[in-house]
Amino acid sequence: PPAISPYREALEFTPHDAEATFKLAEVLNKTGDTAGALENYRSYLKILPDGPYAKRAKEEVDKLKKK
């Protein structure tokens, strides 16, 4: 899907870009890539455990683990 590509490109240049990591997780989650979404939510939480999207990332990790 086209929306995934800009985030993947951003992460190639700045692999620890928390915002791009979170947004990629969101897109993957919407497109049904549970494993990819889970991996990127977890990566975001490693980079910014108390970041602006941490609460949502944690909620999504919990939901996806139950799937």
Image: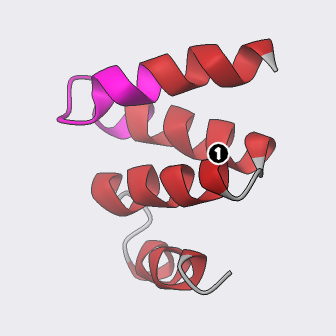
Image check: 11 left or right of 55?
Answer: right
- Is 16 situated above or below 3? above
Q: Which colour scheme is used?
A: secondary structure
Occupied quadrant, residue 13: bottom left
Image check: 59 left or right of 27?
Answer: left
- Residue 57 in the magenta stretch? The answer is yes
Q: Position of residue 53 (x, y in %)?
A: 27, 35
Occupied quadrant, residue 34: top right
- Report the front residue among 19 and 16: 19
State which quarter of the image contains the C terminus: top right
- Is 24 situated above or below 62? below
- Is 11 situated above or below 52? below
Query: In the image, what residue type sits under mark 1?
Result: Ala
Q: Position of residue 32 (x, y in %)?
A: 76, 50
- Residue 8 in the magenta stretch? The answer is no
- Report the front residue among 9 and 23: 23
What residue is rendered at 73% in x and 17% in y? 65
Q: Where is residue 62 in the image (x, y as percent from the top left)?
A: 60, 14
Q: Label 1: how many residues lie within 10 Å, few (<14), some (14-19) or many (20+)? A: many
Label 1: which secondary element: helix
State which quarter of the image contains the N terminus: bottom right
Q: How many labels does the image show?
A: 1
Task: Tell me which segment is drawn in magenta.
Answer: 46-58
What residue is rendered at 46% in x and 72% in y? 11
- Is 29 situated above or below 7? above
What residue is rendered at 64% in x and 45% in y? 37
- Report the front residue among 20 and 59: 59
Residue at numbered disc 1: 37
What residue is rendered at 37% in x and 63% in y? 20
